[in-house]
Amino acid sequence: MQSIESSSHRRGLRLTNVALLVVVIAFIVAIIFAANQNDVVGWMVVAIAGGWLILSTVSLIMVVRGARAVHKTAQNFGSNIAAASAGGTVVDASDPMRDTKVDHSLKIVEVQKRVISEELTKGVEQADIEMIERALDTIEMTAANARDMINPDRHNKSKPDSDNGQGTISGDIIN
């Protein structure tokens, strides 16, 4: 399959190069005839041939860029299909918006950790327990949101603790 694609690619490239060569030769011949004749019609033919040369060069460049983009998209699509069929979740590692959101989530966690540390340094009697609980809730919510951004399908899988907390351990925390 690879050799068929590369041979047809080479054949198309050769044909394009031949067509571009014909336009360049026509341009050179028009310049020579216009210089020998030194008349207005000859120079108009030179201008027309030059325009066609520029147009064909620009279109060749655009077609090559488009072909490369299509080839890259096809490769990405093929790798995404392979990853999905292997059972993995496809996450684009180069998503700047997702990276910014995860970075913001981690900053929130850092700020809330600092709030908790400041409250705990005040001592048990003077610490604002409600503020500590709000900070812990914020950390929990932010971590869940960040995990959802990284793995959007994590809630679709069956979990052993799907009974929402029944059978969990409860008691007092001793420092």
Image (cartoon, grey):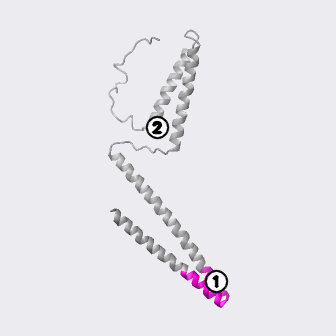
Give the answer, above or below, for where 78 lies relative to 9: above
| Quarter occupied by residue 163 | top left
Sequence-wise, which precedes: disc 1 or disc 2? 1
Q: Which residue is mark 2?
A: 149
Write the residue at 64% across / 90% down.
Answer: 36
Say which amino acid is labelled 2: Met
Q: Secondary structure at mark 1?
A: helix
Q: Residue at 39% across / 38% down in the picture?
A: 153
**Which residue is outermost to the bottom?**
37
- Residue 149, position as x, y percentages in the image: 46, 37
Q: Is residue 89 magenta?
A: no
- The residue that label 1 is drawn on is 44
Q: Residue at x 51, y 19 (%)?
A: 133
As displayed, is residue 137 above or below residue 127? below
Q: Is residue 174 above or below residue 93?
A: above
Instruction: Find residue 72 and report its horizontal and vertical position in percent.
Output: 44, 56
Q: Which residues are magenta?
A: 25-48
Residue at the image position 37 percent from the left and 24 percent from the top: 164
- Residue 108 rendering spot, x and y as whole percentages: 55, 29
**Quadrant where the image shows the N terminus:** bottom left
Say what amino acid the circle numbered 1 marks. Answer: Met
Magenta segment main secondary structure: helix
